[in-house]
Amino acid sequence: MLERTRLLKPSTLYLSALIGGLGLLVLHTTLDFGGRSLDGPINDGVYNALMMGSAAAVLARGVFVRGEDRLAWLMMGVGLLSWSVGELYYSLFIEGTSAEAGGSVTPADAFYLAMYPCFYVAVGMLARRHLRHARTGMWLDGVIAGLGAASVAAALILPPILDQATSAHSSVIVSMAYPMGDLLLTAFALGAIGVTGWRPGGVWLLIAAGMLVSAVADSTYLYQTSTNSFQAGTWLECLWPLAAILLAFAAWTPQRRVPTRNMQSWQMLSVPTLALVSALAVLVYGNLGHHLTLTAVILAAATVLAAGAHLVVTWRENLALLVRSQRLSLTDPLTGLGNRRRLLGDLRLACKNAGERDLWSLALYDLDGFKLFNDAFGHPAGDSLLVRVAERLNSTVESAGTAYRMGGDEFCVLFDRSHVRYEALVHASVLALTESGADFSITASHGVVHIPEEMSDPAAILQLADQRLYRRKAELAALHSADAYDREDDLPLGEYDGDALAGAAAEQGASDRRVRRQTTL
């Protein structure tokens, strides 16, 4: 924090000095502060000092401040330096000469035009940090906004310039590159802002503002020179240093991480809708008899196509989200098997299509000893065991049935009884749900219902399968209890009331079932 404070304090003073110099230039050009005697020192000296100073500020940001955006600001600084060198060359060698009066192309134009590729690269690099969370729709939002703005600007700015241009200004064609470059650069900046989810923060607002101010200045200058109305030393000359200073401020503004937010439906549609309306307005404007340049038509058409692509992408994203939501609602999150909702849907379909050829069976399973395992080893170990037995059950029955997890330690399989190995698979499914170790033993009780011979109502099928499952569980519990009692007294099982033991075990099973159902509800 201390290191950042030491870096920001000099930068704040430096940027304040740039603002002071810009204020002096504005006062002189608009209110004639200091008189005409200061035209040279202020219009040329202060002007070029502001341009060079802004470039130095951006380069210093790239040189002295470490971070992932370091190279981006270096590229931005190089572009701004090329622009400043072009301005200085123009002031020293072009201004007041026949080259300026004739409007011919000069070496200064090469420095001006070299600025744009550097800015494009810098903006792209700065946008990289947002690409990790960017959706395709967010990119398209920015592209649509940029194209829409560029189409409107091209429709309103370019025709008057071309109509009023005279052959005496041979640089008009070359000068056209400046507003076009600014429009594309502004569109590129808007595209990058769209990637942020329209939460740009101070850095991107300053970058976009600087590029927009530069576009306005270049377009105004081009119109005035083409119509012989340009005058040196006016408010227009303040706009270019203002654009450069805005970029310098952007370089030294802390760029905070903006958390992702969920946009409302009207927010997601507002940007592409406004851009599409703007493009359609441009095309209607041209059909009403106004002259449109080919550039304006292409940009407007591209905006319409991008809006159509945005509609398709949004539809696909929403469809994928719907499919994912449906999958999650029908899948058990622990084992990946179908859940109770999925079983009920499949069971209804099986009951509806069951007939002489389509025979089904529902097998319901309950793990014996799982509660003791959980108490002994903990719930994470219990979850791991459920995952293992679920994988074995699914791989065992997948050729002739579908496995589900009902919840807790209950599983279910809907078998296709037409399969030749149906009986063997039922037995194998029980074995798949068993597991034992040195200190535990997990077995499975099950109940089977045939569809449609025994029942064809989903709720009744589940109830009957549940009854048969717990009847088998009770029988096994009675046998185990009787066997343990017989071993203790060395008496044959026949000397005890087996019916009474079975009844007691059945009663205990029914009690366990009621507790399970109450817990589930």
Image: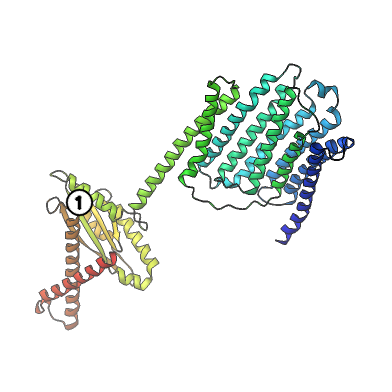
Relative to 371, does residue 33 appear above or below in the rendering? above
Task: Determine the residue positioned at 21% across, 49% down.
Answer: 348
Relative depth, front residue between 448 and 397: 448
Is there any visible trace of residue 359 in the rendered image?
A: yes
Q: What is the crowding at mark 1: few (fewer than 14 residues within 10 Å), some, or many (at least 20)?
A: some
Question: Which image quadrant: the N terminus?
Answer: bottom right
x, y (%) of residue 324? 39, 48
Relative depth, front residue between 143 and 427: 143
x, y (%) of residue 288? 53, 21
Give amino acid for label 1: Tyr
Is there any visible trace of residue 116 in the rendered image?
A: no
Display colour scheme: rainbow
Relative depth, front residue between 437 and 101: 101
x, y (%) of residue 287? 53, 21
The answer to which image quadrant residue 440 occupies is bottom left
Which residue reaches farthest front?
A: 31
Which residue reaches farthest right?
A: 37
Question: Which image quadrant: the C terminus?
Answer: bottom left
Label 1: which residue?
A: 422
Q: Secondary structure at mark 1?
A: helix
Task: Determine the residue positioned at 51% across, 51% down.
Answer: 261
Task: Determine the residue positioned at 25% across, 57% down.
Answer: 412
x, y (%) of residue 217? 71, 33
Badge count? 1
Task: Determine the residue positioned at 63% across, 33% down.
Answer: 184
